[in-house]
Amino acid sequence: MKTPLEKKLIFFATTNFHKFNEARAVFTKHGIAVAMIRIKSLEIQENDLEAIAKFSAMDAAKKCGLPIIVEDAGLFIKALNGFPGPYSSYIYKTLGIKGVLKLMEGIENREAEFRSVVAYCEPKTNILEAFCGKIKGKITEKARGKSGFGFDPIFQLLGSKGLKTFAEMSIEEKNQYSHRAKALHAFIKWFLRSR
Ligand code: ITT
């Protein structure tokens, strides 16, 4: 059984302030406080985001001795067979947005998906759970917008609401659609029910 404090406070292991700020906005809506633990947890070389996130959560919980969440996310581009997917962080740092746009030159099918997995680990009880969120969109021809991070300037939602890139949205607006917000909502629903 969680104490009232344990039900109202979450520790989030991440080195990415943007992710943390987006998550904080979601948690706040549910009356939950979130603390950023700035550690880089181990990420195994895997093709499966869920396996990576679960391994990282176990590592972070062991290092901190706290119940903790980590989040692993990636951009999956259909015409590139899901690349960069789990390698998004590395590809962002090496090729960057320009490099990805170059890879997409002349490609008509620009469908892409952001995926997120939030993994929660409790060291005392060995509870380990993962929650997924996805959002479909397309890769724009040019980068647009200054908000957000990573590949936000080249990711545009599909459908009628899809004129803006994520980088042209506020955090609140991005959180209405994003892979991360969806995974976090699934986690919060489970977390508030679990004992
Ligand atoms: P931590 O592992 O410390 O949490 P990170 O930035 O390394 O932070 P990931 O391993 O999950 O996070 O890397 C995912 C990369 O995918 C990230 O660096 C971005 O380039 C990209 N990415 C993920 N979610 C994104 C989003 O909402 N908007 C834009 N790019 C995103």
Image: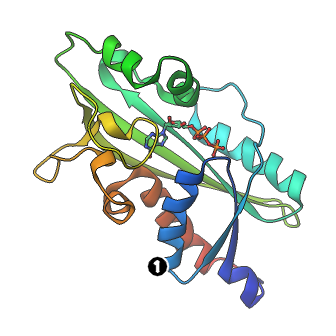
* Residue 150, above or below 54: above
In percent of width and height, residue 13 lies at: 71, 54
Q: Residue furthest bottom?
A: 4
In front here: 108 or 20?
20
Rendered image quadrant of residue 121: bottom right
Give the residue at x 32% y 47%: 166
Give the residue at x 40% y 40%: 114
* Residue 38, above or below 74: below
Rendered image quadrant of residue 113: top left
In percent of width and height, residue 61 lies at: 82, 56
Question: Of the residues shown, which amino acid type is indicated by label 1?
Answer: Lys
How packed is label 1: few (under 14 Cα within 10 Å), some, or many (20 or more)? few
Displayed-image quarter of ligand 1: top right
Q: Quadrant of the N terminus?
A: bottom right
In percent of width and height, residue 66 lies at: 83, 65
* Residue 8, above or below 89: below
Residue pointed to by mark 1: 29
In front here: 78 or 100?
100
Residue 131 in view of the camera: no
Q: Determine the secondary structure under disc 1.
A: helix
Give the residue at x 23% y 25%: 110
Q: Is residue 157 left or right of residue 185?
A: left
Give the residue at x 29% y 42%: 136
Residue 188 in view of the camera: yes
In percent of width and height, residue 50 lies at: 60, 42
In front here: 94 or 104?
94
Q: In which quarter of the image is the C terminus?
A: bottom right
Rendered image quadrant of residue 75: top left
